[in-house]
Image (cartoon, grey):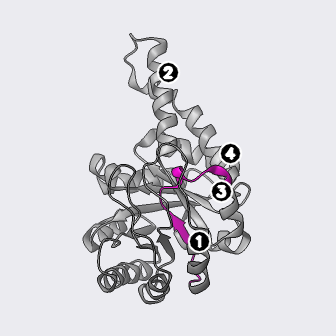
Amino acid sequence: MSLATLAEVLQPALRDGYAVPGFVCLGWEDMRAYVAAAVAERAPVILQAGPGCREHTPLPILGLMFRQLAESVPVPVVAHLDHGHSLDECRAALDAGFTSLMFDGSRMPLDDNIEATAQVAQMAHRAGLSCEGEIGFVGYDGGMISQGTIPAEASRFASEAGVDALAISIGNVHLQSVPGATLSMSQLRDIEAVTNVPLVIHGGSGVPTAQRAELARTSNICKFNIGTELRMVFGAALREALARDPARFDRIAILKETEPPVVAAARAIFQNLGASGRA
């Protein structure tokens, strides 16, 4: 079995100057493709179940899927709850076999966010798991506006909440389909100066690949969440498979054809972040 916690894959990344992708999962086909890419690249991988994924598939099933994949490969696989919004939801993920819990209290007042995240972190650590928190709010493309991370608040949050990874808002935006996010380097450096935990960028699809590579190598950002750009690869492959023969109806045969393009795209992300050969 190669199940790993978030801390187990991010601390080496922080030490050695690379980042690990947190791949946003929606179903068995993309999960399997991400793990196949990790094996091919000899890289650690973080499989993430976000709110949309959990609406479609119950947490206990997702936990079994993640663990089944981890048990079948030699590289570290993190089973990560993304954007958990309550202690009960985080506890349910723990019970379902997840190895990492993200509590998202980013819309709460600072004191409330610290208190709630600390409860999740303590619960996770008692079980030998990891916890990610968020300070500042990462908005959504065409939707809610971001609220940037204030370095002094990040310092207090990291210290008092006891998290293993800290998601920050420095210009990154969720669900961007075209890279173009303008990250504030001065804000990042100010946050790095007052924290010592691995940092996380949500909305990694919106960050140009050249900047992702540079930040993975030269900053404390050790995890980029990647979803939209890979969903676009999956969607294009699915449309192409259907267009080749509109009379097809065997969903398993059709969905299998999405796997090679997604594996190739995921492999390129591992390489770009410097994660290849680290497992």
Q: Residue 261 shows which numbered tag?
A: none
Q: What are the residue bounds of the magenta stretch?
A: 195-211
The kind of residue tagged 4 is Ala
Residue found 48% across the figure and 46% down from its top: 31
CA gap, disc 1 and disc 2: 39 Å
Spot occupied by residue 48 in the image (x, y as percentages of width and height)? 45, 56
| Residue 115 as seen in the image, left or right of residue 239 | left
CA gap, disc 2 and disc 3: 31 Å
Q: Are marks 2 and 3 in contact (CB under 8 Å)?
A: no
CA gap, disc 1 and disc 4: 20 Å
Q: Earlier in the sequence, mark 2 or mark 3?
A: 3
The 10 Å Cα crowd at callout 4, few under 14, some 14 to 19, many 20 or more, is: some
Up-down relation of residue 132 to residue 263 (above or below): below
Which residue carries the number 3 mark? 211
Task: Report the mark closest to the observer, 2 or 3.
Answer: 3
Up-down relation of residue 264 to residue 126 (above or below): above
As for residue 268 lying within the magenta part, the answer is: no
> Which residue occupies the foreground of this view, 273 or 146?
146
In which quadrant of the rendered image does the N terminus lie?
bottom right
> Which residue occupies the foreground of this view, 246 or 256?
246
| Residue 152 as seen in the image, left or right of residue 275 | left
Q: Is residue 165 visible?
A: yes
Which residue carries the number 1 mark? 8
Q: Earlier in the sequence, mark 4 or mark 2?
A: 4
Q: Residue 240 shows which numbered tag?
A: 2
Task: Identify the element where label 3 is drawn.
Answer: helix
Task: Report the mark closest to the observer, 1 or 3.
Answer: 3
Which residue carries the number 4 mark? 40
The kind of residue tagged 2 is Glu
